[in-house]
Amino acid sequence: MAVTDPVDARLLAALADVGKAAVHEIAAKVGLDPREAAYRLVNLSANGLPLLVGVESDPNGLRAALAGAWQQGRPQPQHGPAPGQPPQPHHPGPPPHPAGPQGAPSGAHPVQGTPSGPHPVHGVASGPYPPPPQQQWPAQTAPPPQPPQPTQPPPDPVMSTWGPPQSALWARGDQPPTVGPPPPPPAAPAPVRTGRPGDVLETEGLEGERLAVQLLEVQDPADYLFAAAGYRLDDGERAIVVHTEVTNRGNTPFASLPDNYLELLTADGGVIGKAPVSLTSRPPHKIGVQPGETTGGHTVYVLPEGTRIASVRWSPRPEPDERSLVWSIDD
């Protein structure tokens, strides 16, 4: 594809100088609005130019923002009496009375459809009841016989020991019920994130992909491979080629470039990113790893000749986190 638009040409020239950068950084270099720069880069990529326009996010942060917006639009519960009904006055309840038939306590009873508790009757607040009047009997006259009072059945030993059926006490009535949720299951051991060249290390992608990454080879130096591909090293520089394989062991496709954030860590704590070149004799990684698929590729690095490499690090995002993998190569 031939690039005829001068703005597109300036945009591609700035991108070719750095190899990899954020959209807003490229837009600032050429003096464009980031939205226009992103629009132009997407169109150029769709028309066959060798560039990839990506978007990176924090999935947990986005879900939290969406959840906050949903909570703001959710109606709040209303408290207090229903519209059109006066508030119920509070009155002290009647004193306790002996149990009546079937073990039910005498006194105020709840009314169907209203909260249980004492209630006023015909506008008169309930309160202590006056004692019943004592009947006077003529001298030497026996009171009339009283009807037999129903007796309470003896307590069921099963209920008193084990409690009501289908309850926690039914399982163990001789112990008090436990309060609170059950303890969480023991956590699974954390996967190993460090190793040596040749080891397969497991991790997760940004969307929960189950990935296994293997460091197969670190070719240092690889100046002759770099020169055979038509590139030239400056004085005091050397090239390194790293060969890795990525296996998707989950059900979610991995949609990124597998070596996008494959970096070299130097002995003095420095970080070296990959060079924007590919070798004909050592094919690079391709974008995406489907579930059950294993793909491999080579990554090229250009660094000062005297730099000592200590390890290789793979991460699913630019900033390393708990999902990063590290292979130590410093003998």
Image: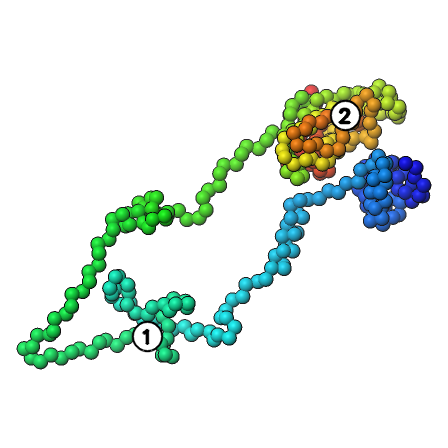
Identity of the residue drawn at 85% across and 39% down: 47
| Secondary structure state at the residue bearing disc 1 | loop
Residue at the spot x=24%, y=53% of the render? 155
Q: Secondary structure at mark 2?
A: strand
Label 2 neighbour load within 10 Å: few <14, some 14-19, many 20+: many
Q: Callout 2, which amino acid?
A: His
Q: Is 78 situated left or right of 37 in this image?
A: left
Which of the two residues, 260 or 280, is positioned nearer the viewer here? 280
The residue under the point 84% across, 19% down is: 224
Count the marks. 2
Which image quadrant for residue 98?
Answer: bottom left
Q: Sequence-wise, which precedes: disc 1 or disc 2? A: 1
| Residue 200, visible in the rendered structure | yes
Check disc 1 and report the residue beneath it: 127
Residue 274, x across and y down, in percent: 78, 30
Q: Which residue is mark 2?
A: 298
Q: What residue do we see at 49% from left, 38% from top? A: 185
